[in-house]
Image (spheres, rainbow, N blue to C red):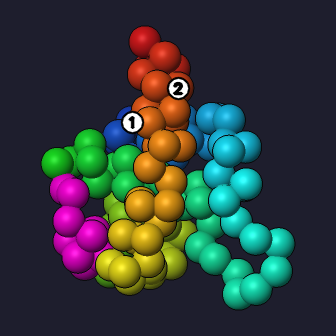
């Protein structure tokens, strides 16, 4: 699948930039025990890439995670449902604002 995505594709930029962001605040939102959650970095990458493509619907993002090679690659072939995506987005609202600030500074 990796060979199917161009080296200069925006999905690779999102992947690299998010991997290099400081996401310590996200770790505070997760409990040490209980069922393992989808990785916050993966969820954030998917949401940022969706927003870059003017997609804000959790249901549309869920469908793209099953059909679009860019989203499948970015999510590492994981398939969170729309409820999980929405819960994540609501849980990290404030942190997402900080991430967007970091993202703008990195891209500038």
Residue drawn 44% across the image and 77% down it: 84
Q: Residue furthest right?
A: 32
- On the picture, is 1 further left or further right than 50? right
Q: Nearer the viewer, residue 101 or 45?
A: 101
- On the picture, is 57 further left or further right than 14? left
Residue topped by disc 2? 102
Residue drawn 53% across the image and 43% down it: 95
- On the picture, is 27 further left or further right than 75? right
CA neighbours of label 1 inside 10 A, class few (<14), some (14 to 19), many (20+): few
- State the mark number for residue 87: none
- Residue 102's x, y, as percent? 52, 26
Q: Nearer the viewer, residue 52 or 99?
A: 99
Residue topped by disc 1? 8
Q: Main secondary structure of the magenta part?
A: helix
- Residue 9's x, y, as percent? 35, 42
* 105 is higher (above) or lower (below) than 51: above
Q: Residue furthest bottom?
A: 35
Q: Which stretch appears magenta?
A: 55-64
């Amino acid at each position: 699948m990796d060979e199917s995505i161009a080296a200069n594709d925006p999905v690779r930029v999102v992947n690299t930039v998010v991997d290099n962001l400081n996401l310590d605040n996200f770790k505070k939102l997760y409990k040490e025990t209980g069922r393992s959650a989808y990785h916050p970095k993966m969820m954030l990458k998917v949401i940022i890439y969706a927003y870059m493509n003017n997609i804000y619907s959790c249901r549309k993002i869920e469908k793209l995670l099953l059909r679009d090679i860019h989203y499948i690659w970015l999510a590492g072939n994981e398939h969170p449902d729309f409820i999980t995506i929405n819960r994540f987005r609501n849980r990290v609202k404030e942190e997402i604002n900080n991430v967007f600030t970091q993202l703008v500074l990195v891209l500038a």
